[in-house]
Image (cartoon, rainbow, N blue to C red):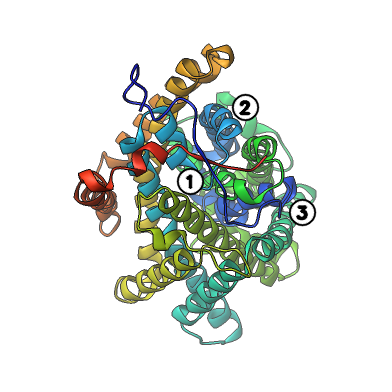
Amino acid sequence: MSPTNPGLVQEGPSTVTTELRTGSIGLGGTLMQSIAQISPTLGIFYTIAFTTGQAGISAPLTYLAAFLVCLLIAVPMRGLARHLPSAGGFYTYVSAGIGPKAGFMTGWLYAIMVTVVPAALAAFTGAILQDELGGKYGIMIPWWVYATAILVVCFACAYRGIVISIKFLVVMTIFEMLVGLGLAVAGLIAPGPGGLNLEGFNPANIQNGSGFFLAVVLSIFAFTGFESAAAVGEESRDPKRIVPRAIIGSLVLIGLFYVFTAWGLQIGWGTDDLASLAASPTAPAFVLADRLFNGASLIILIALVNSGLGVCIACTTSATRTIYGIARTGALPSVFARVQPKYRTPIVAVFVQSAIALVVCLGIGLPLGPYNLFNMLGTTGTFVYIPIFILMNIAAFRFFRTRHPEEFSIWAYVVAPIVSTVALALIAYNSLVPLPAFPVLLAPFIAITYVILGAVVLVGRNLRPANRDWMARAGELPEVD
């Protein structure tokens, strides 16, 4: 510990030889890890009805506003990623900037969140398959069968290693984005009532300020996942250069994708009839595809399933690498840092994460229902991301102010963190007031449970006098360039 600043770990981070497969992926693969965890087509196809209902014709602007807020979050994260390329991600960032206790709680929250997210996404994707294939083609397979198959594929990819996982993500992510862009372009070529126009980008058309704000809130969390490039930093080539570029690059690409696709979907539906888009009982993308692609909504279904599978694979990668990064320092049992000799994957973390995801998916999804599970755990993720991002902002300020004052920037490490922190606090308030209905009502309490469990591990295990060695290693870095 630094004698002049006891809140920080040692001034010069120690290094450790990583056992993961270094140099396996380039900028494209790292970029696709982030984009896949954002889940592009699910993010736009299943938010456009809500954002239109709240913001009307100004829905494209809500995605633009959310993109700008997320850029403010990404600016300090980019700086940390450049100096701290570790599989521990937020654990390493916050440990190096604030201290090991805060770092452990941040890493714990992120790890447990991305461990259970595949359960929710697999259930949701399975439910979409059940509804669409059952309703249109009479294929009556229950959602949990599809969900189980998705989680099995995720396990197989995680077990076999980062290269095969990234290959899956590159192909799937490019495909789903091309489908989303294709549908938007088709909407612009064959617009509905109201014709081709740019009214969605005119701020004067914002009629309901509170509704617009709520739409921005949802849109912000449609961007989350851009941070996951950090999880594969140790397995990428030149991580100090690639990871920061992937964080910003994924945000820029998804920002452009969301704004353009939202505009194209609204135009294709018809800007004179947006009330029916907001109230559509079927995802508007399916309705538009049936009209614009001569009934070929099956393409949209494939893209959505592709997106669901992609985000599950990406989250599995993020979860297992974060757990590995924490365990390697001793803050979790060392068994979680065990690496499979042939494929160089954190094998115990892979098995445990996959088992938890399957148990949550079936154990809670069957009695509660797949859509309720998705909404509940998705909202829980909102409450978990907020403290993680705020702690990361504080860590970036302290890290650059004390360790790299020559790189300290008022804009990057004061203005951007303050603005994004205020935005995140407003998001938290508007997510709680008024209280949501059951089972989403449980989300903040689940998030609090995550915190309590982490505190129990921290106090009951990690702060015992015989177990405190991890605190000196919490900000350690792998020997990668």
- Amino acid at dot 2: Asn
Q: Which of 300 and 335 is in front in this view?
A: 335
Mark sitting on residue 88? 1
Q: Residues within 10 Å of mark 1 (few under 14, many from 20)?
A: many
Mark sitting on residue 376? none
Split into 4 quadrants, where in the image is the N terminus? top left
Give the residue at x 49% y 27%. Answer: 12
The residue that disc 2 covers is 202
Sequence order check, earlier mark of 3 and 2: 3
Left/right placement of residue 345 relative to residue 28 reads: left
Left/right placement of residue 407 relative to residue 207 reads: right
Q: Give the SS element for disc 3.
A: helix
The residue that disc 3 covers is 186
Q: In this view, does 420 lie above or below 247?
A: above
Image x and y of residue 32, in percent: 67, 51
Image x and y of residue 450, in percent: 28, 52
Q: Is residue 279 above or below residue 237?
A: below
Give the residue at x 58% y 16%. Answer: 407
Residue 116 seen in the figure: no
Q: Nearer the viewer, residue 201 or 291?
A: 201
